[in-house]
Image (cartoon, helix red, strand yellow):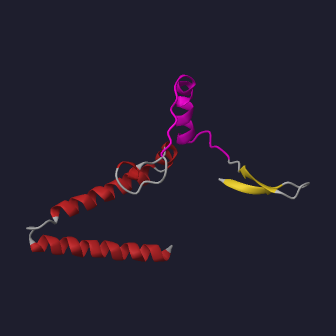
Amino acid sequence: MTGLKEKPRLGAKYCRILSTNVQLKSQVFLDFKAKRKDWIYEEHYCNPGPIQYFDFGKNFTTITLILQHKLYNELQNNIEEYCNKIKSSCRLGTDENILKAAAFQLKTITRILGILENKS
């Protein structure tokens, strides 16, 4: 987000915020544009604070990232739900064949993901 720029006369470097182009037809800009009038009268500032790895803030995502990566977030939530279902189904007393099937499928998925990671 920031970069160093040198002052030609003094030779000193200072930090500056790099400029970026805004896509005026993107969903992110249109969403912020729709909320612009509300910001005149109310404060909607949100500071998520430091990165949270556990508890309440672990899945907090900014509005910009949610709008830019909607499908990605949905897929990530689906995967988390599937993992939770598998975890709750494979408890003490579960039939051994179910455990074997779950373990085999998870091992297969892990191998496929490893292959895909090595390709990129």
Residue 105 lies, in percent from the top left, at 25, 72
55 vs 29, nearest the viewer: 55
Answer with the quarter of the image where residue 79 lies. Answer: bottom left
30 vs 90, nearest the viewer: 90
Considering only vertical position in the picture, is 33 above or below 1? above
Q: Is residue 47 magenta?
A: yes
Q: Residue at x 46, y 46 (%)?
A: 66
Considering only vertical position in the picture, is 5 above or below 22? below
Q: Residue at x 35, y 77 (%)?
A: 111
Answer with the quarter of the image where residue 10 lies. Answer: bottom right
Residue 1 lies, in percent from the top left, at 65, 53
Considering only vertical position in the picture, is 22 above or below 71? above
Q: Residue at x 59, y 39 (%)?
A: 25
103 vs 8, left or right, is left
Q: Is residue 106 magenta?
A: no
30 vs 51, left or right, is right
Q: Residue at x 51, y 73 (%)?
A: 120
Furthest toward the right, the residue is 9
61 vs 73, nearest the viewer: 61
Considering only vertical position in the picture, is 24 above or below 43? below
Answer with the quarter of the image where residue 75 lies. Answer: bottom left
Q: What residue span does the magenta drawing correspond to?
A: 21-48
Residue 8 lies, in percent from the top left, at 89, 55
79 vs 18, left or right, is left
